[in-house]
Image (spheres, rainbow, N blue to C red):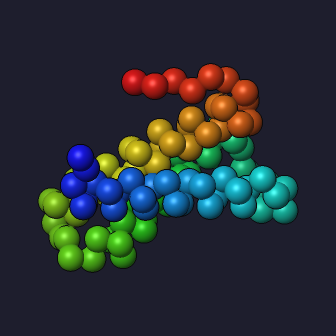
Amino acid sequence: MATKQEQKIENLAKKIVDTMFKDFQNPAMQGPNFTWEGFPKMMQNLAQGYTPMTFYTLSGEKLDKVEEAVGKLAFKLAQEKVNSEIFKKPSVKP
């Protein structure tokens, strides 16, 4: 069973990836440098940027670890979504 913090990490990463993936389906949202190949890294950075606001009670090394976990998960979720829905590749599970 996931801890409350792990659940919060998962919820944050999933919400950002799902929302942004839907938004970027609209070509008007895609700037001149947008690529689906770069989408996972963009989601990693975005998720890490939201982490301090979501985990406002953490600081220092604890916040750094949570930011890293949120970023890694957002990258993984975004990569899976792009592979399965944009490039039609099967999802790769570790």
Give the residue drawn at x 39%, y 53%. Answer: 10
Answer with the quarter of the image where residue 64 lies.
Answer: bottom left
Horizontal relation, residue 11 to residue 78: left or right: left
In the rendered image, residue 74, in percent from the top left (x then y), is placed at: 46, 48
Give the residue drawn at x 53%, y 60%. Answer: 16
Give the residue drawn at x 56%, y 54%. Answer: 17
**Against 60, is 24 above or below?**
above
Q: Quadrant of the C terminus?
A: top left
In the rendered image, residue 58, in percent from the top left (x then y), is placed at: 19, 71
Residue 79 visible in this rendered orientation of the protein: yes
In the rendered image, residue 41, in percent from the top left (x then y), is placed at: 52, 45
As drawn, the residue found furthest toward the left would be 61
Horizontal relation, residue 41 to residue 3: left or right: right
Horizontal relation, residue 45 to residue 7: left or right: right
| Near-viewer residue (64 or 17) | 17
How many tags in the picture?
0
Give the residue drawn at x 70%, y 56%. Answer: 22
| Near-viewer residue (44 or 14) | 14
In the rendered image, residue 8, in percent from the top left (x then y), is placed at: 33, 62
